[in-house]
Amino acid sequence: MSEKIGFIGLGIMGCPMALNLCKAGYTLWVHARRPEMMLPLIEVGATACSSPKAVAAQTDIIFTMVSDTPDVEEVILGENGVMHGASADNLIIDMSSIAASSTRRMAATLAEKDIEMLDAPVSGGDKGAIAGTLSIMVGGKAAQFERARPLFEVLGENIVHIGDHGAGQIAKTCNQVLVSQTIAAVGEALLLAKAAGVEPANVRKALLGGFAGSRILEVHRQRMLEHHFQTGFKTKHCHKDMRVAMQTAHELGIALPGTALATQYLSALMGTRPRSLDSAAMVLALEQLSDVHLGKGERFKEE
Ligand code: NAP
């Protein structure tokens, strides 16, 4: 426990992750753009800092868990960014889901100052963040992965060193390619049942035991069948992940037609619904196409 820990970005994922590190006995220095987001951490003994730079000046290992690629760039490289408070041998662990190309550029810039970086995006949602059971996909040097391993073991269960800088983000993009298309597939299957006059809840129950069973079919029951889209994983973040996937495919010169289709469902929602709805709301776009509706009524509640 000798290393001092910083944590920047205390939203749906970052807050419970930082709390788990406190519970495990680590001393934390934290920063959030909206000061009130730091209160749960201050209550358990963390120190509030005015900027990412101030966090880095106090700590050895600094986690970032913010939204999108430009946000991570701002928090790490910006005027008040981590880089300007960090010193040689500090380690920055970015757990946000962002573009691998940006991660690689940031790691190279930090390396010029002997500052280490790992990309370590996660899967498992808010439930996994609270329970400390996340899947963690890590890119960067093996020695830094070993240095961070005790911390990762507090936050998650399935912890894999994928490869060099950016490899963790590529794994996360692969994860989102699967997740987005599975949400759409589950939505289509449940709507087919409904249109055919068969109870979708019973179809889901039967399917869970066979080859079509999936974690998304399991956890999205209430969300899709009851239109309960209280935020877990925001549609705006899912849409962002699709943008990252399509941009990566563009750079590589490969086709991801299924992902492109899932992107369109999300794009339809982005203009018409609150962006904080859970990504299971993708089923709403499918419902409109055929005018078949699963939920009894729409319950949209902004956070
Ligand atoms: P969130 O609830 O929206 O939290 C993001 C936090 O980052 C917010 O507190 C936000 O501050 C802060 N932030 C964003 N841009 C910033 C900037 N430029 N400077 C300082 N702070 C900034 O999102 P989340 O669900 O925790 O997701 C965080 C990351 O994890 C995203 O990349 C997401 O794709 C990924 N992820 C999410 C889930 C999930 O189920 N939720 C699962 C796996 C991965 P404000 O509050 O001021 O906006």
Image (tube, rainbow, N blue to C red):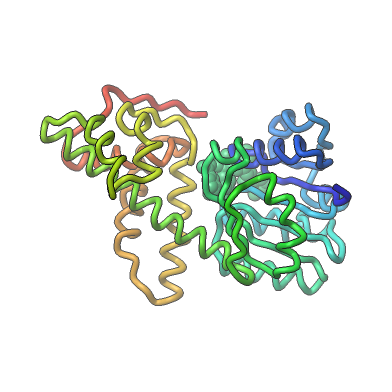
In this view, the residue farthest toward the front is 209
Q: Position of residue 127 (x, y in %)?
A: 54, 36
Vertically, is 251 above or below 34? below
Vertically, is 206 above or below 119? above
User: Is 240 left, or right, of 209 in this rendering?
Assistant: right
Residue drawn at point x = 38 percent, y = 28 percent: 228
Foreground residue, 117 or 264?
A: 117
Which quadrant of the figure has residue 91?
Answer: bottom right
Which quadrant of the figure has residue 121?
Answer: bottom right
Foreground residue, 58 or 140?
A: 140
Vertically, is 36 above or below 89? above
Q: Position of residue 279 (x, y in %)?
A: 41, 41
User: Is 2 left, or right, of 72 in this rendering?
Assistant: right
Foreground residue, 280 or 263?
A: 280
Residue drawn at point x = 62 percent, y = 47 percent: 156
Q: Position of residue 213 (x, y in %)?
A: 32, 45
User: Is 133 left, or right, of 214 in this rendering?
Assistant: right
Answer with the quadrant where ligand 1 appears in the image.
top right
In this view, the residue farthest toward the left is 196
Disc count in the image?
Answer: 0
Q: Position of residue 22 (x, y in %)?
A: 77, 37
